[in-house]
Amino acid sequence: MNLAEIRRRIDKVDRELLVLLQERMGLAIRAKKFKRAVVDTQREETVLARAERMHLDLVQGSFARQVLRTIIEESRRLQQEDRPLVAFQGESGAYGEVACRRLVPGGAFIPCMEFVDVFEGVRQGHLDLGVVPVENSLEGAVTQVNDLLTTTDLHVIGEARVAVNHCLLAAEPLDAEDIRVVYSHPQALAQCQRFLLQHRMEARPYYDTAGAAKMLARENPRAAAAIASELCAELYDLHVVARGIADGATNSTRFLLLDRAPFQGQGNKTSIIFATAHEAGRLFNVLRLFAEAQINLTRIASMPLRSDPGNYSFFLDFEGGMHDAHVARVFEQLAGMGIVVKCLGSYPADPNGQ
């Protein structure tokens, strides 16, 4: 092993330490929801004493205690900031976090394994807000999220449409010709197929785009790269080999911001869910009411009812808020038709597009 290889391994360990430190800080912020006070001296002393008892050959107990004390002090500072905890599905750096940063600047962004973890965390009050994708311009509706929206008591209080700009990331400064293997989510790999074929790169599926970037930072496999967001490059100290490598130029995902309470204001966009009997003309009669009231529909989607597969739930987004008189009249007419409507919320529309 030469000096260059030793330094390469040191860089790898440093990146891994910082990634783990980010995870620890996130857990520390979440712990505040379950504590009566920020400072818990008994718990802190237990953690510090355990570090001193570890007989590591090259790390003295006093040094381990000093390092952990510094980490605990920083955790305490973060808890005292009282930032809102904003949950998203995926690893840090996922496009869900990009949406979080747009919707809640200054929040503490908490990664969750599954969409249901986002919904349940907000519902139970362990997390303050949730950000979930509802539709993608190429892939269509996000079925699991739409299913959860039908049963949730949470309210939609905002939206953001995020451009999906796939980047090729590497742990070291490399040219595209030096890369042999590329890791990412299967959908991202499929969306960048032309670029991969052109550069003769082997595509290897991974569970998440940001997860692939995180793995690259921690393991630094040779001649390897990941396809992920540019935010991942910032979070994991990765090099951007190429930007905008997707086959299609227009790829975006619309995200919704969820809260336990409705939006406190007069939103100019509304999301609803309703169901109709599986009869000819029933859906047309509902949509006709919106057309006659000159209400612009921005989204129509359907999904089979789990309780009754022969019938469907319909997801409708439209311009205007529940406080608008012409919108209220439409809802009165729907009630007269026996249509049960679930209003997810009225909220500010994303000015960057529908």
Image (cartoon, rainbow, N blue to C red):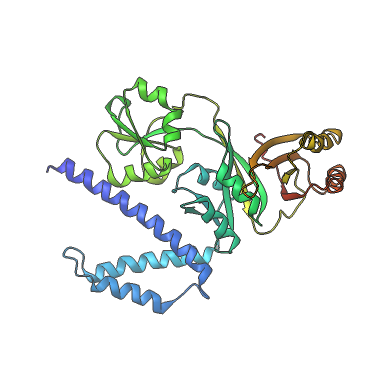
Residue ID at (46%, 48%): 90
Query: Which of the pair 67/335 is nearer the observer?
Result: 335
Residue at 31%, 51% in the rendered image: 16
Classify residue 337 as left or right of residue 308: right
> How far across and down, in percent of the image, does residue 29 sit?
48, 63
Against 260, is 136 above or below? above
In the figure, residue 172 lies in which quadrant? top left
Give the residue drawn at x 37%, y 41%. 212
Q: Quadrant of residue 171?
A: top left
**Residue extending furthest top?**
198
Residue at the outermost left position: 1
Q: Nearer the viewer, residue 34 or 70?
A: 34
- Residue shown at the point (66%, 37%) measured from the top left: 301
Instruction: Look at the picture and state if 25 lies above or below 346.
Output: below
Say which quadrant the N terminus sits in. Answer: top left
Quadrant into which the C terminus falls: top right
Where is residue 186, by image quadrant? Answer: top left
Q: Position of residue 5 (x, y in %)?
A: 17, 42
Query: Can see residue 108?
Result: no
